[in-house]
Structure formats: structure tokens, C-alpha cells
Image (cartoon, rainbow, N blue to C red):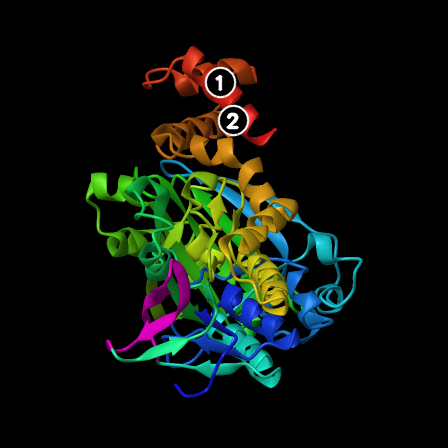
Amino acid sequence: MATQFDAIVVGAGPAGTSAALGLAQAGAKVLLLERGEHAGSKNMFGGMMAYCPAPEELIPDFWAKAPWERAVTKRTLSVAGAGSTTSLTFQAASDSDRPAAGAGSTSDKSLTAFTLFRPRFDRWYAEQAEAAGVTLLTSCRAEALVLRGGAVRGVRVAGPDDIIEAPLVVACDGTLSLLARDAGLHKGFKAEQVALGVRALYEMTEETVDERFGLIGREGATQEFLGCSEGVRGGGFIYTQTDAVSVGLVFHLDSLKERRLPPYELLDRFVASAPVAPLLKGARMVEYSAHLLPEAGIPMVPKLSMAGLLLAGDAAGFCYTNGLTQEGMNLAMASGVIAAKVGAEALAAGDFSAGRLAKYKAELKDSFVLRDLATWGKAIDFMHHDRLFTLYPQVISALMEDMYRSDGTPKERIFRLARRAVSGRSVGVRRILADLIEAGRGYA
């Protein structure tokens, strides 16, 4: 391309658009490359994102302007056993006006999460970047880096002669980042470090969503499931959109491979299960998608920079699931903003050396991005025990069924009921105590 750019950002997802917008606002001439027909067209996303203040550094009152679907006020964690489900629900104190008002006020932000429809959200966000001067080029795949003198000097797209040069490249090209691998920053990932998410989107009226999930106005609800994946390590989710519901499963890839169960068949059975089917009655499935997610935490984070190159978002491994929460999009946006800050400083100094760009990792360490990954490191490891997804859901189910059974016999104390629930199963008291201690170390 004849036009000269100061920076090339690869991937118009939350991380890439944040980086491109931040660089453009600092005066850089930025090219944003997107392999889809438009920003968001290639994104598979369950639907929920925790509130993140990072984009408000770029667009004041960002969350008051962005096209989010619902503000989450109800969150439910369900443990599915044989024939029963035990649930714990958090319901935020709110009224029908709070979600819309809270999105633009400081008082509610710390407790707010949003459901998003990524094709709409990402497209809007990319339009804000274009308005700030970013050149967006869609249906364009970056296939390799241009390396010269040990430094990145641009990207190659489409064919061997299609070269776009710039002194800075920000790679936001997803979990299996081809550019990070091309740069030698990682050598690929193991199956146990990656998860596979499968999701179906069901269309229904806004009024039906409100009625079935007990919502008012723009309130939203989420529900996470444990013990629903037929022995595969993983879990399920339901997220409410404005006039649709996202339903899906997330599996540890190594466990799915070991069990040799087709993920789409597991999803079909999950959708037809007793806790889920009534919520989808009469709804029409309009979309099915699958996507790989980085879930190993700090061990999966590659080297984050080299001369002329920064990694952000999923390409940097910034995603985790600790069993209670899953974070990724907020980490992506924050890392994109930080990449823009460091990149703008490098542009101002005319210095894109490895030493200069190493400041990026230091900035991430000071932010919640790497701190959160470190905080939940042990919890992430804990989630790789098969018995959490097979044995313990059955124990909880048996305990709760005995606790609430009324059959004319005398009641027993909870400890005795717990011993009965465990009896005959392949777990002893010592193993349970060891798991409780490990869980305490991971979450406490």
C-alpha cells in the first residue's frame, strides 16, 4: 500500500480496536486489519462482559453510549446432579431504571456486568475508531510478519507480494495468534491450556426474555452450570440478550479429546435438559458457533513484546476461568488501551526497540490484567480436577435430595446426610479435605 502508516493493528476485536483508537487519538496514522467482512463478524462470544473502565479513557461515558444489550443484575450458579439441580442466585438490589442509569454513572459501575451482541458491539466500536482517523480494512487476513534486522517492520497479507509496512505492529489476532507464533514469542499451546466454547443463539421476544428470567427494563440475567458436561471438564452458561438468549458449553480441550464426545451433541443434550429446556420453549435457534479460548492463565501468557511488536487480548493469553467467573473481554480492552499508550510513547520517541516496548509488560503488571491472572492462578489449576465436574455434583445432588426429602422418617443431621452422600463413591474424607484445602488456597 502506498500510504505510510505509523502502526498496524491486526484484529478489530475489543483489544485491537482499543489499541487502534488509542494510537489514533495520540496522533498516529493507524491501519486496523480485520479478516471478517466487518468488525465482529468472526467473533464467537458467550455474551457477558464485566464492567471495564479502560475504554472510558478513550471515549468519555463509553458505557452510556455503547450498544450493550442488558445490565446483569441476576447471576445464578447451578450444580447439576442426577435428576436434580442445586442453584445459588445473587440478585442485585435494583429497580427498572437502574441498569440504564448505572451504565453511565460512577456509583454502580463496580457491580455492573453487561451482555453484548458482538457483531453489533464490535462494529460500533470500530466505527468510533474510524471517526478518530483509523483506516479500517476488512476481509483482509494478516498471514505473516515482515521481519528485518531482528525487528518487526510490518505484515504480509493475502499473497507473498502484498506487504504493508509500519514501525509498530500490535497483534490482536486471537488465541492461536499466527503473528505471535511467527515472531517466535510462543511455540503453540498444549490442549490442556485451551478450552473450546460452543454456543447457540435462540431468538425470542424481549417480553418473553423478561418473563422467563424475571427481569424488568434492561436488567439481564446469567446462569452458569457445573456438572452438565457429561464427565468432560467444563461448564454451561445462559446469557440474556435483549431479544435473544445465548446458551453454550465450554470444555477443557484435553478432556474433550480424551472423552471423544462430539461437542455439538453435548450442546444438544444440554439444551434439552430439564433446567434449560423450559427457558427456551418456543424459541428459534438462529446461530451456532464454536471458538477456542485461552484458559491457562499466567502459564499461557507468551513473551508480550519484541522490537516493533506488541501482543494484546487473546493473542497474549489474557483470558481465564476460575470456576466462579470467566474474564476475557475486559482484559482484552484494558490490554489494548495499555498497548496504545506504550506504542504512542514509542512513536513519539522514534524508538521501537525491544527494550523500549518492554515497558508494556511493566504497565500490565501494574494494571488488573496480569494481577488478576496471578490472583487466580491456583484456582485455574484447581479447575483441572475431573472430580469437580463428575463426582462432586453427584454428591451435592444426593445431599440436597436427602435434606429436603419428607417421607415420614425422623430427620437426620446434615453431617450424617453428607456422609451418606459420599458413601459408596470413589472419594474418601481425606480426599475431600485435601480438595477443600486446595480450594481455599485458590479462592481465599
Neighbor class of circle 1 (other Cα within 10 Å; few <14, some 14-19, many 20+) is some
Earlier in the chain: of badge 1 and badge 2, it is 1
Image-quadrant location for residue 64: bottom right
Residue 85 visible in the shown view: no
Q: Is residue 38 left or right of residue 51?
A: left
Part of the protein shown in magenta: 140-160
Asked whether 62 falls inside the magenta stretch, the response is no
- Viewer-nearest residue: 5 or 316: 5
Q: Main secondary structure of the magenta part?
A: strand
Residue marked by disc 1: 417
Single out the mark in the foreground, 1 or 2. Answer: 2
Question: Is 239 or 111 nearer to us in this picture?
Answer: 111
Front in this rendered view, residue 148 or 209: 148
Secondary structure of the residue carrying numbered label 2: helix
For label 2, the residue is 439
Q: Residue at x 74, y 53 (%)?
A: 93
Inspect the image, locate mark 2, and give the three-letter code of the amino acid beneath it: Ala
Q: Residue at point 37% right, 61% down?
A: 149
Q: Which mark is residue 169?
A: none
Q: Measured along the vertical axis of the image, is residue 199 above or below residue 68? A: above
Question: Could you tell me which quadrant the C terminus lies in?
Answer: top right
- Along the viewing direction, whichever of 253 and 277 lies nearer the viewer: 253
Query: Whole-percent x and y of residue 154?
Result: 40, 71
Residue that extends furthest to the left in the rendered view of this protein: 260
Is residue 300 visible in the rendered image? The answer is: yes
Q: Position of residue 19 (x, y in %)?
A: 56, 67
**Quadrant (top left/top right/bottom left/bottom right) for the N terminus:** bottom left
- Find residue 50 and report its horizontal and vertical position in percent: 60, 55
What x and y, as percent, mark residue 20?
55, 72
- Horizontally, is 133 left or right of 435 in the view? right
